[in-house]
């Protein structure tokens, strides 16, 4: 139900007092644009001509102080507040499911400082990822977080869902690159976390805000670790006959700490479909892109050692060109119509676990999804792309090319597939997500994910946000 | 659905050009990014929205500067799609009064900014002067003609005060745009020109791409269309320009003109001429080359003048933030807009005018 009458105007007048009339909108077109993020469900809903739940207000603050004041208004009226960065999240984390105030942070896009000695950048959370990268590139530096969403996501959006980028295997996830944050708590209190994250001065409380997706507060500024732009990037592609061998080769490269910046391993189904469609290579088997960067001598030696491991599995060296082609076109997968797109139904059920469990998990999920939805001719594809010393993320996806036309039926089928996939993930020691976050999509799995630990998280939430105004319905927290 | 308009179906949920979308960048508003505009248009077509003040404000916020398409891996013609939707809106009598008024001026005078003077001379080489060049920035035109003379060319000025069809097409009046485009071609043919140099990237884009793609008009095969800046860059050895003495570091920033992202071949040519004219490489803006943002010189000056002004101000701020004391640009359209909006007393100099001062005295 839309919120009409005197009270909405009262709220609007208070918001206008804080940010100015130009930065508060209740326009129909604006409210539509903020009614969907990159989650399949709201996009499908709109595609089928259904009316979405829109925010009541879009507010564009310029500072942490303005956000603080906005949150105090929201608490007074018990209005939901949904922090918004680039709107590129795929989990529905920015959806105004109960209406309320969408807090668009993009006016907060200032670079506060680039410290070329400590190799850090401090920037406001609303800065666009690519624009931030261009700015540090001018100093010969890089923020080594290269997600596919860099063109549209914001710095705050990198951190809020604990994002991972293409070169995380060497440089870490976004959460590993942050030294310090400024956060506005739900009650309007503005805090800064300590100057460095690695210390022994008490608990690591700053991590609470990483992955909280705006439910514990609003990240307004962050100091991030930078690296020098690498002297070289050596890329090549190899082809394994067998996926099991490929995973084991990847494990050996990682556990021997050869420091690839990327290992991108496509399962045979992805090799046959996505690699063929985007890169044009018609191959059978498991296609792996391997990259080493930095000092040329060191990268060359690391690559040689890795190739010794790979050759031990009888994989075929495809040379540099296919590896470089992948690097140059790595984001082309996300441009329509090359990307997965409506009216298809699709979802990325990516997960992470340890090496001893990953293969079993992958095949269990594949079997559950493929057998459970055979009548829908479901396609299940995946790639292994973020590797750790202890395990690896698998980016599994399902695709149904002829989903129900009826929007409500499509919602039900979509959620059933997710239930099946997440049950297989949880039963096999996986996390419900590795880098897209929880959002609305996975909110219902959080209690199962955390079991005995969930009440603690719930208590923290209630303590920080007693009125439940911050991004309700997300990350397992209700309204 | 019209084939071109089909682009909105691909763009409505795609965010991949956000980093270079100029209006989104200055307004920080999701609804006036390429995806937001496409989404509003797509929902209007699904009956979820109607064209009203709010939704038309979004539809007319697209500047048609080409940034989204220049960065689109799958080459979605969103600006053309939006122009086509604006045409539907105009047909339905819903175009805003300012848009109608700008269109009427062009339809009546062939010019949005003054008058059109048909060419009377004949020759092999021509310079397409355009509407803004003739009516608002004649010093740039004169400088360009003198430089061409110094190259040994006898050039016929054509299209003096004539809109190339770009503005009416972008406003949503393809019939008027078609008539303007035909007029451009007729004048070039009537004057016997076989080599047509084009002063403004806006007109060059119209001739090289827009006429064919949006209006289904093909230029005669025997007319070669040449970017003036490319030609002059090739003539630097012949011009024998005298660089200013003792300059090692420049405080002049080069502004890539509106539509430059649609003509990436000109980036290096412009800089090589700047180097000769200024004595060293110009300062580079943050928004440069393939990410260059437009000033408010496109149809946006009529569709959403508030946004147009902010686009221009953002270019000036970019130059100030880079420590520039002056701005240099070759395009009369961009130069005019920058001069109109500057409040900082920045020196805004035409590249061709500056080059002219470097010509040897006997030239």
Image (cartoon, rainbow, N blue to C red):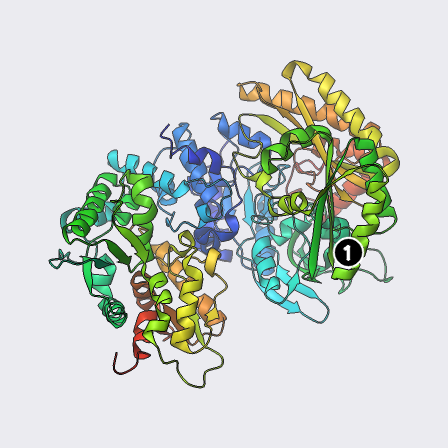
Residue at 84% x, 56% y: name it: A203
A6 shown above or below B276: above
Q: Nearer the viewer, residue B254 or A8?
A: B254
Residue A109: percent from left, percent from top: 56, 59
User: Quarter of the image containing the C terminus of chain B?
Assistant: bottom left
Q: Is residue B175 visible?
A: yes
Residue A222: percent from left, percent from top: 67, 59
Residue at 68% x, 15% y: name it: A374
Q: Quadrant of residue B22?
A: bottom left
Q: Quadrant of residue B357?
A: bottom left
Circle 1 packing at 10 Å, graded few (<14), some (14-19), many (20+), is some
Q: Nearer the viewer, residue B17 or A25?
A: B17
Residue A261: percent from left, percent from top: 74, 51
Q: Nearer the viewer, residue B234 or A471?
A: B234
Of all residues shown, which one is farthest toward the bottom? B246
Residue A140: percent from left, percent from top: 64, 66
Label 1 sits on a secondary structure element that is: helix
Q: Is residue B304 visible?
A: no
Residue at 36% x, 76% y: name it: B345
User: Quarter of the image containing the N terminus of chain B?
Assistant: top left
Q: Nearer the viewer, residue A329 or A61?
A: A329
Of all residues shown, which one is farthest toward the left? B120
Residue with the mark numbered 1: A300
Q: Quadrant of residue A134?
A: bottom right
Is A8 displayed left or right of A329 in the figure?
Answer: left
Q: Chain of mark 1?
A: A
Is A426 displayed left or right of B92 in the figure?
Answer: right
Is A193 displayed left or right of A414 in the figure?
Answer: right
Total residue callouts: 1
A119 shown above or below A13: below
């Amino acid at each position: 139900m839309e919120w009409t009458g005197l009270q909405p105007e009262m709220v609007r007048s208070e918001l206008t007092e804080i940010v100015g009339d130009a930065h508060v909108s209740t326009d129909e077109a604006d409210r539509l644009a903020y009614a969907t993020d990159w989650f399949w469900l709201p996009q499908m809903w709109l595609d089928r001509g259904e009316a979405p739940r829109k925010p009541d207000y879009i507010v564009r603050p310029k500072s942490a102080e303005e956000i603080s004041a906005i949150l105090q208004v929201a608490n007074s009226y018990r209005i939901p507040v949904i922090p918004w960065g680039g709107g590129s999240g795929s989990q529905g984390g920015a959806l105004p499911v109960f209406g309320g105030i969408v807090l668009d942070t993009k006016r907060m896009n200032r670079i506060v400082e680039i410290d070329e000695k400590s190799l850090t950048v401090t920037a406001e959370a609303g800065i666009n990822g690519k624009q931030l990268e261009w700015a540090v590139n001018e100093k010969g530096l890089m923020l080594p977080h290269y997600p596919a969403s860099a063109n549209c996501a914001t710095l705050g959006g990198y951190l809020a869902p604990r994002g991972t980028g293409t070169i995380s295997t060497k440089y870490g996830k976004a959460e590993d690159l942050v030294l310090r944050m400024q956060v506005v708590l739900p009650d309007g209190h503005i805090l800064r976390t300590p100057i460095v994250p690695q210390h022994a001065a008490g608990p690591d409380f700053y991590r609470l805000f990483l992955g909280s997706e705006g439910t514990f507060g609003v990240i307004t500024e962050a100091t991030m670790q930078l690296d020098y732009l690498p002297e070289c990037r050596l890329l090549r592609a190899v082809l394994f006959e067998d996926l099991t061998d490929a995973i084991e080769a990847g494990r050996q490269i990682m556990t021997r700490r050869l420091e690839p910046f990327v290992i991108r391993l496509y399962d045979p189904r992805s090799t046959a479909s996505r690699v063929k469609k985007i890169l044009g290579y018609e191959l059978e088997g498991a296609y792996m892109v391997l990259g080493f960067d930095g000092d040329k001598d060191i990268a060359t030696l690391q690559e040689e050692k890795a190739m010794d491991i790979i050759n031990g599995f009888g994989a075929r060296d495809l040379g540099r060109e296919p590896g470089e082609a992948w690097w140059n076109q790595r984001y082309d997968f996300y441009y329509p119509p090359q990307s997965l797109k409506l009216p298809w139904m699709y979802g990325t059920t990516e997960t992470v676990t340890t090496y001893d469990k990953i293969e079993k998990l992958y095949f269990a999920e594949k079997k559950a999804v493929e057998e459970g939805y055979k009548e829908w001719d479901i396609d299940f594809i995946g790639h292994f792309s973020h590797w750790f010393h202890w395990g690896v993320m698998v980016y599994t996806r399902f695709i149904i090319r002829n989903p129900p036309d009826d929007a409500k039926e499509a919602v039900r089928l979509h959620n059933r597939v997710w239930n099946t996939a997440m049950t297989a993930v949880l039963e096999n020691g996986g996390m419900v997500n590795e880098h897209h976050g929880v959002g609305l999509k996975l909110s219902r799995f959080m209690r199962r994910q955390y079991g005995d630990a969930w009440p603690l998280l719930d208590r923290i939430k209630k303590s920080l946000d007693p009125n439940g105004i911050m991004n309700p319905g997300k990350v397992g927290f209700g309204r | 659905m019209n084939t071109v308009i089909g682009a909105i179906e691909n763009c409505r949920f795609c965010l991949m050009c956000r980093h270079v979308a100029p209006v989104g960048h200055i307004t920080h508003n999701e609804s006036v990014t390429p995806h937001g505009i496409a989404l509003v248009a797509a929902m209007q077509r699904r009956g979820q929205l109607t064209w009203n003040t709010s939704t038309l404000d979004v539809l007319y916020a697209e500047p048609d500067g080409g940034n989204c398409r220049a960065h689109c891996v799958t080459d979605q013609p969103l600006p053309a799609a939006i122009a086509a939707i604006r045409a539907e809106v105009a047909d339905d009598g819903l175009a805003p009064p300012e848009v109608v008024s700008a269109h009427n001026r062009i339809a009546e005078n062939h010019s949005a900014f003054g008058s059109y003077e048909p060419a009377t001379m004949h020759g092999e080489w021509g310079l397409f002067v355009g509407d803004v060049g003739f009516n608002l920035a004649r010093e740039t035109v004169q400088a360009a003609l003198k430089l061409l003379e110094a190259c040994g060319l006898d050039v016929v000025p054509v299209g003096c005060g004539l809109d190339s069809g770009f503005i009416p097409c972008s406003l949503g009046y393809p019939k008027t745009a078609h008539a303007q485009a035909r007029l451009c071609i007729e004048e070039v043919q009537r004057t016997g020109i076989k080599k047509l140099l084009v002063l403004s990237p806006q007109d060059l884009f119209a001739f090289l791409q827009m006429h064919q793609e949006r209006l289904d008009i093909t230029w005669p095969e025997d007319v070669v269309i040449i970017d003036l800046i490319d030609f002059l860059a090739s003539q630097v050895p012949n011009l024998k320009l005298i660089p200013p003495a003792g300059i090692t570091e420049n405080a002049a920033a080069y502004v890539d003109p509106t539509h430059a992202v649609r003509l990436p071949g000109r980036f290096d040519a412009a800089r090589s001429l700047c180097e000769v004219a200024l004595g060293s490489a110009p300062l580079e803006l943050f928004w440069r080359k393939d990410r260059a943002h437009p000033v408010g010189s496109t149809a946006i000056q009529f569709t959403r003048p508030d946004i147009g002004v902010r686009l221009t101000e953002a270019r000036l701020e970019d130059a100030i933030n880079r420590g520039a004391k002056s701005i240099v640009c070759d395009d009369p359209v961009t130069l005019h807009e920058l001069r109109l909006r500057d409040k900082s007393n920045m020196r805004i100099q035409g590249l061709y005018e500056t080059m002219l001062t470097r010509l040897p005295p006997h030239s």
